Image (spheres, rainbow, N blue to C red):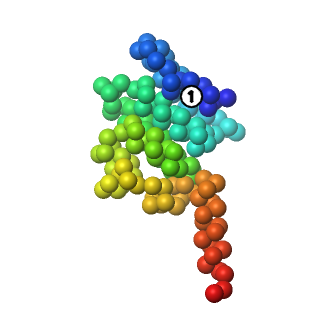
Amino acid sequence: TYNSVLRVCASTKGMSEQRVALSLAMKVFRHLIQHDTIKPCSITINLFFKALSNLSPAANSDSRLSVIRTTFRYCCDRGLLNDHILRQLKLGLTAAEMKELVGFETPFEVSVKQLPWEWSSASPRRKRQHRRKWYNSYIPN
């Protein structure tokens, strides 16, 4: 599966192999975004962020951060954000970079529940929480 390829890319060791793995991860993710019927899920996005974090050299941080910003917007626009993705971003970004993405003064303490609901609306857990909240608001006391 595509997720398996991204998982292997993210765990690649060795400098020359990492360049190839990063290139492959970028191609796989780009292919998924452009595909008509297959789309990335939150697991795919999490694995892609892990690959970027593990494989992108710090010297290339501007282009890396640009890809992270674009992917984060893609993720939020489709309601795929979850705490696993946030945790992966926290591992790979500085406080200033995280603050730019999520807009919180203390970005390393933020959880999905504190962010706009739309960013995680496709998450099964968030859907259950939203239904439960709606249902509980209509139960007579």
Q: Residue furthest right?
A: 37
Residue 131 appears in view: yes
Q: Secondary structure at mark 1?
A: helix
Q: Residue 74 or 19: which is nearer the viewer?
A: 19
Residue 122 appears in view: no
Horizontal and vertical percent for residue 35?
A: 64, 35
Label total for image = 1
When asked about the image quadrant of residue 129, the answer is bottom right
Q: Residue furthest bottom?
A: 141
Horizontal and vertical percent for residue 137?
A: 61, 78
Which residue does the image show at 58% across and 37% down from the upper left?
A: 44
Horizontal and vertical percent for residue 60?
A: 33, 26
Q: Residues within 10 Å of mark 1 (few under 14, many from 20)?
A: some
| Side of 34 relative to 93 (left or right) | right
Which residue does the image show at 61% across and 32% down from the upper left?
A: 3
Q: Residue furthest front?
A: 141
Horizontal and vertical percent for residue 130?
A: 60, 65
| Quadrant of the image containing the C terminus | bottom right
From this view, report whether residue 66 is shown above or below residue 73: above
Which residue does the image show at 51% across and 34% down from the upper left?
A: 48
When asked about the image quadrant of residue 97, the answer is top left
Label 1 sits on residue? 7
Which residue does the image show at 60% across and 25% down from the upper left?
A: 5
- What amino acid is labelled 1 in the image? Arg
| Quadrant of the image containing the N terminus | top right
